[in-house]
Amino acid sequence: MAAYKPRILAQSVRRTLTGASGALSAGQWLAIAVLGLSGVAAFGIAPDTTLETVPTHTILRQLPNPAAVAFDAPQAAAPAARYWREERIRRGDTIGSVLARLGVDDPDALAFLRVDAAARPLYQLRPGKPLRVETDDDGRLVQLRFFAGNGQLLSIGRDGERFATMATTAPAEIRWEMASGEIHSSLFAAADAMSLPDAITLQLAEVFAGDIDFYHDLRRGDRFAVVYEMRYLEGEPAGAGRIVAAEFINRGNTSRAFLWRDNAGGEAYYAQDGAPLRKAFLRSPMEFSRVASGFSSVRLHPILQTWRAHKGVDFAAPVGTPVRATGNGKVLFAGTQSGYGNVIQVQHQGAFSTLYAHLSRFAPEVRPGTRVMQGDVIGYVGQTGWATGPHLHYEFRVGSDQRDPLTIALPNAEPLSTANVRAFAARLAPAAAQLAMARSLANSLLAVAE
């Protein structure tokens, strides 16, 4: 057997090219050079190679004849091209600089914006807010849209050579967002770490206030998950709404809450089995205050200097501190009564009523007959009537008898009616599913569609 002799590929290629004689003619070398420089590659098909025939189908379709147009008929003018553009307000921007970046070249529009009083909110430019304009192909302003705050959409439109300004309430889109966190120091620190809105953090503490003391009971490693509403106006976040579902694991004990809205517009939170989470009344009508004078059978009156019973609790707070309704009910009286000064009395379920005295003013919508919900702001701390300093005098009554609101056994909130139990279960299902997803997140915030 002959020994194997390795060969270089280039040698084989050269032998193939040169043939047996070992030499190429000048014409052959010229042809090879031209092919190499031109980048042409040659491909061949081996003899007896069978190619598959691609099946073809003939399709006939009847097309309508084009409409005949007389050559002398006037041609309709093509509509002018228009363009929508959007810019974010930057620090130091003026309305002129923003419109210039948007490609607006319209001195008449700028002159109108300077003098029209209704367009003044447009000059309150906050960095990050969007400004949208529609222009024609000449750069003239056709429309302008800007969110002026409080859900108001400012629209400026062109009609010929005239402009008009209109403010409307922009329709809000409600989306659900989810968040999950772990306590390392406090609830607010954990919420800030994931950019949870402050309004949702406060609601979370309020929803579980009956089960958890957020000042003393929290432990490192406690966890929470929450699904809440977020309002959007034309794709821009416009504030948080209500908590839809929430879970808090404190010291290994799990509490869950789900929002229920009744047909009358009332809102309350219930456990998964429909049991109410909160008492029918709050202990205190203010979030932050101190007791200046408690409920007692005898006390020296600071003004009359006589000994008499004090059938309420005085909460010391600065003038203007919001006062909350401690339970759902209807306003019986909102006015002035000698020693009480500005006073509100609210009738609740059954024989229960509450009284709030020495107020500086009432909430704008509060008047006799107004229905209030637990936690609604109904007035503000003042020093009206017989008061030596700013404070709220609060009374809790059962029938005509005053009781100590700090020690009385408060009644439970009304449970769901039989007719609402099935509807609550149906509405709970999607919220529970989102809450389970939020629970699986690790210190995260995620937006989802409702």
Image: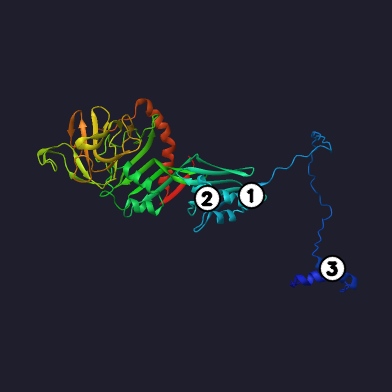
- Whichever of labels 3 and 1 marks the residue nearer the N terminus, that label is 3
Q: Where residue 54 appears, x then y in whole percent?
A: 78, 44
Is residue 412 found left or right of 80 in the rendered image?
left
Q: Is residue 139 above or below residue 361?
A: below
- Residue 254 shows up from this direction: no
* Location of residue 48 in the rendering, given as x and y in whole percent from the top left corner: 84, 52
Q: Nearer the viewer, residue 6 or 441?
A: 441
Mark 2 or mark 1, whichever is nearer to me: 1
Q: Earlier in the sequence, mark 2 or mark 3?
A: 3
Residue occupying the far top of the picture: 419
Instruction: Check whether the beta carbons of the residues at disc 2 and disc 1 lie within 8 A of each other.
Output: no
Q: Tell me the crowding category of disc 3: few under 14, some 14 to 19, or many 20 or more residues within 10 angstroms, Cα based.
A: few
Q: Amino acid at mark 1?
A: Arg
Give the vertical position of 22 relative to 221 (above or below): below
Q: Is residue 258 visible?
A: yes
Instruction: Tell me which amino acid carries mark 2.
Output: Pro
Tell me the element at label 3: helix
Residue at the spot of label 1: 140
Which type of secondary structure does the marked residue at label 1 adopt?
A: loop
Q: Which mark's residue is nearer the viewer, 3 or 1?
A: 1
Tell me the residue that label 2 is attached to: 130
Left or right of 137? Residue 99 is: left
Sooner in the amino-acid sequence: mark 2 or mark 1: 2
Where does the image place residue 336, in percent across and percent down from the top left?
25, 35
Q: Are marks 2 and 3 in contact (CB under 8 Å)?
A: no
Any mark on residue 34, and which? 3
Residue at horizontal 56%, vertical 53%? 87
